[in-house]
Image: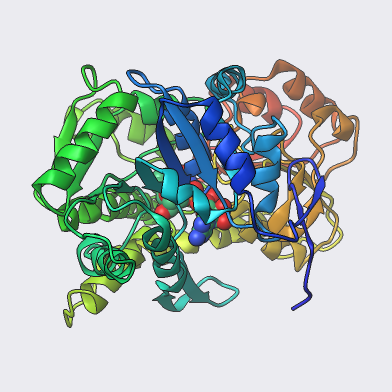
Amino acid sequence: MQNVAYSVNPFTGKRSMLPEVLDDKERIDSFLEMNAGKKVVVVQGLGFVGSVMALVCANALTEEYAVIGVELASPGSYWKIQSINEGVFPVISSDPKIDLFFKKTKEKKNFIATFDPYCYSKADVIIVDINLDVDKKSNFEMDLEGYDVSLKNFKKAIETIGNHCREDVSIVVETTVPPGTCQKIVKPILEECLAKRGLTTGTYTLGHSYERVMPGPDYIDSIQNFYRVYSGIDDRSAIATETFLRTIISTEKYPLTRLGSTNATEMAKVLENSYRAMNIGFMVEWSRFAEEAGVNLYEVVDSIRMRPTHNNLMYPGIGVGGYCLTKDPLLASWARQNIFESNERLAQSETGVTINDKMPLYAFEFLKKEFNGTLRDKKILMLGVSYRSNVGDTRYSPVEYLYNYINRETTAITMHDPYVSYWEEKQMNIEQDLNAFFPGKWDVVIISTGHVEYKKNQKLMNQLLELDAAFILDTIGLLTKEEIYLLSGKHRVRVVGRGDIK
Ligand SMILES: NC(=O)c1ccc[n+]([C@@H]2O[C@H](COP(=O)([O-])OP(=O)(O)OC[C@H]3O[C@@H](n4cnc5c(N)ncnc54)[C@H](O)[C@@H]3O)[C@@H](O)[C@H]2O)c1
């Protein structure tokens, strides 16, 4: 692999040279001097979770913290450090609180980012927010052919903490981990590192409290104003974790839930996401049935959702994306077999992932059927790249898979996304201004992400109505009945999971 000496911010295209010497002690010390008297929180991993968690800690409710975010000085991640230190938050979101919170940290000067593990030695609290990936092996049709979980990087990250932290530090793991990880992996590593350094292993605490953060319009609130589950490897650890969480979360309104062990909270997280992934997978066959039977499944789901016991039945759609639902059921099944040495998998949860992974293929086949089996020479406009509405996260976006299928048939595909300027996975610049596409000539317009910018947007409606007759495919049920009626006067309109539009 080529040795790249810089890191590129995917949102702005700005390059930062990687530091030649990995020493940031002076800057860390002067930051701490400026924040003398404050407790120090170090957040390991400044991704979609850690960067926002760091903001929440820097704007804690009942405590003034000095917050240091640690990232890797790698080509893929160094730009996040640079961006924070230059005063530009590294996550783009529709939540106005992100800008507000970041502005406050700049005023208070209580948040910096670094690559130097020296900062762990200054921490009262360390929050682990790094990734722990599942390596899936799938073919082009997204049949899952196997998967593996490597704990190598995760263990290395914990070792780095153990090699630098104070012996009385409080560690809170937020990363989604295979059940059993805190007890069987994190604790032994930390204790071995502390013992090697001649420190006591009796005063640190280790808690687990998984994230339910929802990137999008309520990004900050999904951490600060939301229910939390936590535990500790022992009673002291659970109490320390609770004490910390109380300083950053509105626990009067959103009481905390303590579970009996870290195995239990780790299981709660992956069960929560497996439940959701299966709920989505469950609707796939019903979508096909509704299309065949001429039924509007959205309407059906709405009517069923009136029952309190069924109020989270999922809608049809283009597929499941993002970092969590696409892997968490597999993490759970892997843990059952590899950490708890069971001969059984979590078969239903694994099947949920397999079904969901194939959803973009169904959307593609749905589209192809409309064109007698081929999209050759068709000009296609896709509205939305990211996997989730109102946020610029393209990881495992189902749009990518739909794009790949279409791209096999026609290269005339144009993408728009108001939240993504550079599509990292496809190494492609993305137009962010809708007006750039109209007037235009499109054979197909696909609504692929439910961004607020596409919803009930009269200007977009007018622009679509001015096009020559086209095929409009709504993969997520974004169009209203009235919009479908209007557009159908000129175009062929179909909605995935709605069989009542011919
Ligand atoms: N994204 C979500 O919506 C979401 C929601 C709930 C839970 N989670 C969980 O939270 C965790 C983090 O997710 P994310 O979306 O922020 O992932 P991410 O990939 O965006 O961020 C992880 C970051 O950790 C960094 N990192 C890795 N090893 C490191 C090390 N040794 N030292 C410092 N930094 C290191 C990576 O470079 C990366 O920037 C995962 O376990 C995920 O499953 C994510």
Q: Is residue 266 left or right of residue 38?
A: left
Residue 426 position, x and y percent, is 74, 59
The quarter in which the C terminus is drawn is: top right
Residue 292 position, x and y percent, is 46, 52
For this orientation, the residue located farthest to the front is: 198
Q: Nearer the viewer, residue 430 or 114?
A: 114
Quarter of the view holding residue 314: top left
Q: Is residue 209 left or right of residue 111?
A: left
Residue 390 position, x and y percent, is 58, 32
Q: Is 449 drawn above or below residue 145 in the view shown?
A: above
Residue at the location (75% across, 68% down)?
408
Q: Is 177 drawn above or below residue 463 in the view shown?
A: below
Q: Is residue 418 left or right of residue 25?
A: right
Residue 16 appears in view: yes
Residue at the location (69% across, 29% down)?
87
Residue 402 position, x and y percent, is 64, 57
Tell me how many marks there are.
0
Q: Is 290 drawn above or below residue 186 in the view shown?
A: above
Q: Is residue 247 left or right of residue 409?
A: left
Q: Nearer the viewer, residue 280 or 445?
A: 280
The quarter in which the N terminus is drawn is: bottom right
Residue at the location (91% across, 30% down)?
439
Quarter of the view holding residue 421: top right
Q: How is the image coloured?
A: rainbow
Quarter of the view holding residue 107: top right
